[in-house]
Amino acid sequence: MTVRKGQYWYVDLSPATGEELGGTRKCLIVKKKKNLVQVIPSIYNGKYIYDKFHIRTVDIKRLKEKTKK
């Protein structure tokens, strides 16, 4: 699996705590280090919107499927 900055992936963000976004969501990859990636989850309300202040660091195993923009 090749993961690069700027790609879009479906990522499993569960379990979520507090006000975090949970579930499987389309995310933008912003940084990759070994087995961890930093992602910005999207919110869907008729079109995808990315919350630039909600950056999550997740294990690469949580990446499900690469998507197009």
Image (spheres, helix red, strand yellow):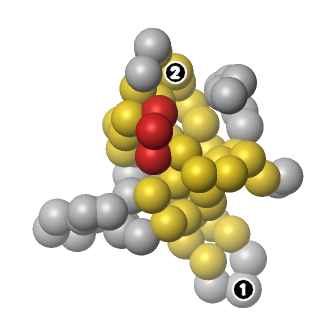
How many labels, in total?
Answer: 2
Of callouts 2 and 1, which one flags the residue occurring earlier in the amino acid sequence? Answer: 2
What number is the disc on residue 8?
none
Q: Which residue is mark 2?
A: 32
Crowd around label 2: few <14 · some 14–19 · many ≥20 (10 Å): some
Figure quadrant of residue 45: bottom right
Extreme residue in the right direction: 68
Residue drawn at (15%, 68%) of the image: 18
27 left or right of 61?
right
Extreme residue in the top direction: 34
Look at the image and tell me whether residue 2 can be seen: yes
Residue drawn at (70%, 24%) of the image: 2
Crowd around label 1: few <14 · some 14–19 · many ≥20 (10 Å): few
Q: Which residue is mark 1?
A: 46
Task: Identify which residue, 11 or 49, lies in the foreground.
Answer: 11
The span from disc 2 to disc 1 (Cα, nearest Å) is: 29 Å
Residue drawn at (45%, 13%) of the image: 34
